[in-house]
Amino acid sequence: MLARLQENFFNLDVAWRYLPSIGEGMIVTIHLAVLIVFTGLGLGLLLAFLRALQWRVLSWPIVIFADIFRALPPLVVLIIFYFAGPFVGIRMSGFVATWLSLSLALAAFAEEIFWAGILSVGRGQWEAARSTGLRYGQTLGYVVLPQAVRLAIPPLTNRTIAVTKMTALASVVAVEEILANAATAQAYSANTTPLTMAAIAYLVIFVPLVAFSRWIEHRFAWKH
Amino acid sequence: MSTTSEPILRVEGLHKSFAGVEVLHGVDLAVAPQELVFIIGPSGSGKSTLLRCCNRLEEPTSGRIVVDGTDITARSTDINVVRRGIGMVFQSFNLYPHMSALGNVTLALTKVLGKSRAEATEIGRAALDRVGLLFKEAAFPNELSGGQQQRVAIARALALEPKVMLFDEPTSALDPELVGSVLAVMRDMRLSGMTMIVVSHEMRFARDAADRVVFMDAGRIVEEGPPEQIFTRPQHQRTSTFLEAVGGH
Ligand SMILES: Nc1ncnc2c1ncn2[C@@H]1O[C@H](COP(=O)(O)OP(=O)(O)OP(=O)(O)O)[C@@H](O)[C@H]1O
Ligand SMILES: [Mg+2]
């Protein structure tokens, strides 16, 4: 029983053979994750800033965007981009489709989190800044947003980890990331050890991220 | 008090409504340069609203407010330019918590007045020195006592060299033992010739430092005069009732 478990899940021969493939998958996963974090958070912050300008032509589409992309399962968006895109002349690689769909999902959540942060900065901060002659946009940029970003950090780190883990979805659109490579290896070797390796690879990437989020939450714990 | 000189701030027939409910029913007030006008009155009488109309944190419903010759309610007036010349100090300090004391003071110097960083730092440090807090320039608001925070807030306004300073209950959020340090700074500002409008319950400070005391009730100015007159010989029943209630006699 124990021997069979080892044979199937912790087979060293198989592990050694497919280590390079899993390693390449890790690089693709990290590459995707980093792109998604920067695009998603950057776009989310930009959208929250634009929404805060209280210009209806902008804020309505932003709210609708955020609601739609928070509601849609990212896998559905990904498949639409990748498989339906070509029908309307938009052809993108699985990598780009994953990057786009997850960035939009993260941006939608980040916009809402930044927006909640903006709203929770007290009226007194606005009034103090405006009373010194700062304009609305300056007050937003120099006084309100820096505080909103701090308030947003704990919920943002959690959401960011949740979305970047979904890079595993890229395996369904032929991106050779960790899970896809592990599944291929499993098929070739008729052994599930590559899946164990995939799980370990994800832990290697994401446990430090989780630890980092703990540290950052602690660091930015709000003090008044 | 110099009644002859042209007022630096003039409020004429000011009305203010919130959602159709009028809370200021035609207020007239003229403040001379270097004058310290003290506004007292019961809660809800419209003191804060009057003050906040003077830099248009609240939009007047009707009436005129002229600051140093500029009608600040006129449509052609850029309110952001006007506000540089009007300092405001709030009951709750409202320091920017993510900036040091010096950062709080220099933000508007660089972003509004366009000063260089070096110049802003020099002006900012001088302003902190004036309120006795140069040694705290690097401290963040959460590292300062309430009294120190309020003095930084005063320095933030002072650094812009305003023509008028508005104070809305600057000591009401402070522990009693910290009130004195803030009042000392205000006294010092008065001696250096700053025009000040102060809403406060510090009656003793009013007696000592005010040129004129204005009593408001229910959205109107009921009476005004030199402190000794208002405090010892009020002309109106409502004034004496209020003063008895707050123990200002
Ligand atoms: N933003 C607002 N919306 C609606 N009503 C308001 C608003 N601000 C003030 N009011 C009302 O206007 C009236 C005057 O309020 P104001 O704050 O000017 O009084 P105050 O004299 O400063 O009182 P206090 O001594 O309690 O500070 C009150 O009835 C108050 O409820
Ligand atoms: Mg008030």
Image: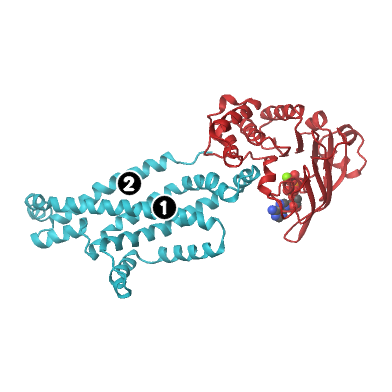
Q: Residue at x 91, y 44 (%)?
A: B237
Residue B168 seen from this side? no
User: In the rendered image, which quarter contains the N terminus of chain A?
Assistant: bottom left
In this image, A198 relative to A130: left or right?
A: left
The residue to which callout 1 is attached is A42
Could you say which chain is coloured cyan in the image? Answer: A
Residue B78 against residue A218 in the figure, above or below: below
Mark 1 belongs to which amino acid? Answer: Gly
Mark 2 belongs to which amino acid? Answer: Val
The residue to which callout 2 is attached is A210
- Distance of label 2 from label 1 (alpha carbons): 20 Å
Q: Nearer the viewer, residue A115 or B45?
A: A115
Secondary structure state at the residue bearing disc 2: helix
* Residue B155, image quadrant: top right
Secondary structure state at the residue bearing disc 1: helix
- Packing grade of label 1 (10 A; few <14, some 14-19, many >=20) is some
Could you say which chain is coloured red in the image? Answer: B
User: In the rendered image, which quarter contains the C terminus of chain A?
Assistant: top right
In x, y percent, where is residue B105? 59, 35
Q: Residue at x 45, y 53 (%)?
A: A45
Residue B92 against residue A73 in the figure, above or below: above
